[in-house]
Amino acid sequence: MNSAPGIKSAVRVLEMLEMLSTHPGRFGVSDLARRLVIPKSSTHMLLETLQSRGYVVRDANHMFGLHASLADGRWVGGPRAVLARVAGPAAERVARATRESCFVGMRRDDECVEYVVKAIGAHDLRSDAPLATARPLHATATGLALLAFGAPEGVERLLSGARLERFTRYTLCDGRAIKRELAAIRKRGYSLNRHMYAIGESGIAVPIVEDGGAAIAAIGSSFPDSRYPQCVERTLAELRREARRLSREIGGGR
């Protein structure tokens, strides 16, 4: 989730409602606190307030979810909710056309990528990732696309934070190397990940942009590196087509 100015409690309420709206099911307090990157005590108080007003329900196992009358996602605004509604069909189209798994992700405040929707490929050997699990910005194709086409201060915030984790010998952890790679991504218009997060896995991603050109999300495909040579061009063409479509629908891009 991107940081935004405003009253902190109001921002947290909106983020919680958007998260519950776009992730079906029930959640415990600890899980919600982790996903929203806020204290567990604050999460519990927010849930109690929303429950008292009828927005949220709690079951016998103390798991929380939106009230059934609100759970279709159409009542909540904001980029995440809009993205979840329109990006699902886009990811499915990419997966059908390429037979490779497709993911659409947004940047979170904790310098990670959260996949909002996914469509799993048809190959026996294919990539998958839980929507609930965050992925590192600097070691994934979607993350690199978000960094390259996001606001410049987003790169500085990542590099000035905690030491970047090295997942494989190919992971970019040096600030100068990351900036060089981001410049190359901006020049060619898409990001590549070969073995950065896991040996044998590759990925490619394209930004979904607002009218001004800044990335609000990224759409990418992940696949075994053994299929990289024969699938990368076709996959890139499909991702670009859907990224343009989503940029028009979500961000007003052309």
Image (tube, rainbow, N blue to C red):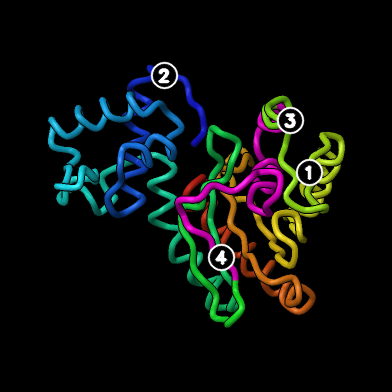
Q: Earlier in the sequence, mark 4 or mark 1?
A: 4
Query: In the rendered image of this protein, does residue 1 appear above or below residue 167?
Result: above
Of the numbered discs 2 and 3, the one sitting upstream in the chain is 2
Residue labelled with disc 3: 159
Q: Give 56 or 77, whichever is nearer the viewer.
A: 56
Picture residue at 74% right of the left edge, 30% below the top = 159
Q: Which residue is pictured at 63% across the width and 52% down the height?
A: 142
Q: Amino acid at mark 2?
A: Gly
- 10 Å crowding of disc 1: few (<14), some (14-19), many (20+): many
Task: From the viewer's perspective, tell me whether residue 134 is left or right of residue 168.
Answer: left
- Pointer 2 local density, CA inside 10 Å: few below 14, some 14–19, many at least 20: few
Q: Amino acid at mark 1?
A: Leu
Circle 2 sits in a helix, a strand or a loop, which is it?
Answer: loop
**Compared with residue 198, is residue 113 higher up or lower down, i.e. above or below?**
above
Q: Earlier in the sequence, mark 4 or mark 2?
A: 2
Residue 226 horizontal/vertical position (percent)? 76, 76
Q: What kind of residue is marked 4?
A: Cys
Q: The magenta stretch spans which residues?
A: 127-156
Pick whichever, 145 or 176, lies toward us. Answer: 176
Q: Where residue 12 is drawn, which disc sits there?
A: none
**Label 4 to label 1: alpha-carbon separation:** 22 Å
- Residue 38 on the magenta segment: no
Residue 182: mark: 1
Q: Is residue 162 left or right of residue 70?
A: right
